[in-house]
Amino acid sequence: MRDDVKKVAIIGVGMVGMSCAYAILNQRICDELLLVDIDKKRAAGEAADLNHGLPFAPGVMKIESGNYEDCCDADIVVITAGAPQKDASQTRRELLQDNVKVFRSVVEPVVKGGFSGIFLVATNPVDVMTYVTWKLSGFDPGRVIGSGTSLDSARLKFLMGAYFAVNPKNIHAYVIGEHGDSEFVPWSNAMVSVKPLEDIVSRDGDAVMADMEDIAVQVRNSAYEIIQAKRVTNYGIGMVLARLVQAILSGENSIFSVSAYLDGAYDNHGIYAGVPAVVNAGGVREILEMHLTAEEQEKFNRSCAILRKMVSETEL
């Protein structure tokens, strides 16, 4: 890594990888952008296409395609490579075995080539694939991050913002646990600006809470509905990844619900799960533990149990 140049490598130039690359270019988040894919011709074509937009970009950026070895001086390697979700009936969990094989062919040569930065994983099932990346890389767990429930939390804020007619940025609520069917919203910690959701429910009635539960279901089903409509979800996660890259490169100490390694947090150990965490140039600085109700803690434990079982199926 070079102190004067910020370099990001994206492995996988499918819809998610290129949505991330496009967002990074349009926000001028780094100085150098490297695209890597098993299909070298496509990676070269994507790099050329982005380069042709540079005259209209907010700043100068070096964009090229390359190999795993070219990641050696990158600050961040974003992994979006993997088997796509075939249709709305296929769960993230069913993608697991194929993606473990893909990651073996990616992570090991990147590390062998001398990469010593931060891994940022988006491939599903993302919590397990982040664990796989950690195991294959041998890195400190804080230097391996998954996009986790960041997109789910963004969907939650969008829908709650529409419901309460406020800017989604003023909604403070998170989806936690598995990025998948066992994810949930700890409503006891949700706030609309400075107003706890519990206070709003007390004032306006239980119907509000019923509507929030409906929103939680919409959040959980969003990916399946989008995939059914357009085969892939890419823009939202692309913007999430670009934002995380920016936070890491800038050392922001910003808080996101990422896949972070649990070593006692929320009374769980040895897995990655989506939880609010402080992200900076070193990766995950710390996990911020919310006070969960007994019911919420049980939901979180169940979600982590599912992740543990999936991890056991990787046979690493």
Image (tube, rainbow, N blue to C red):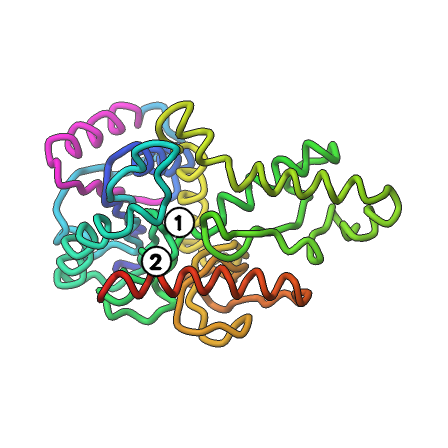
Q: Position of residue 211 (x, y in %)?
A: 71, 38
Judge by depth and name the residue closer to the eye, 13 or 35: 13
The quadrant holding residue 118 is bottom left
Residue 48 lies, with reference to residue 219, above or below; the image says: above
Judge by depth and name the residue closer to the eye, 49 or 37: 37
Q: Is residue 255 visible?
A: yes
Residue placed at 48% from the left, 48% from the top?
Answer: 181
Q: Which residue is mark 2?
A: 128
Numbered mark located on residue 33 in the image: none
Q: Which residue is mark 1?
A: 245
Residue farthest to the right, as pictured: 203
Q: Is residue 8 left or right of residue 182?
A: left
Residue placed at 52% from the left, 72% from the top?
Answer: 265
Q: What is the span of residues highlighted in magenta in the rendered image?
A: 30-54
Q: Position of residue 106 (x, y in %)?
A: 17, 53
Q: Amino acid at mark 1?
A: Val
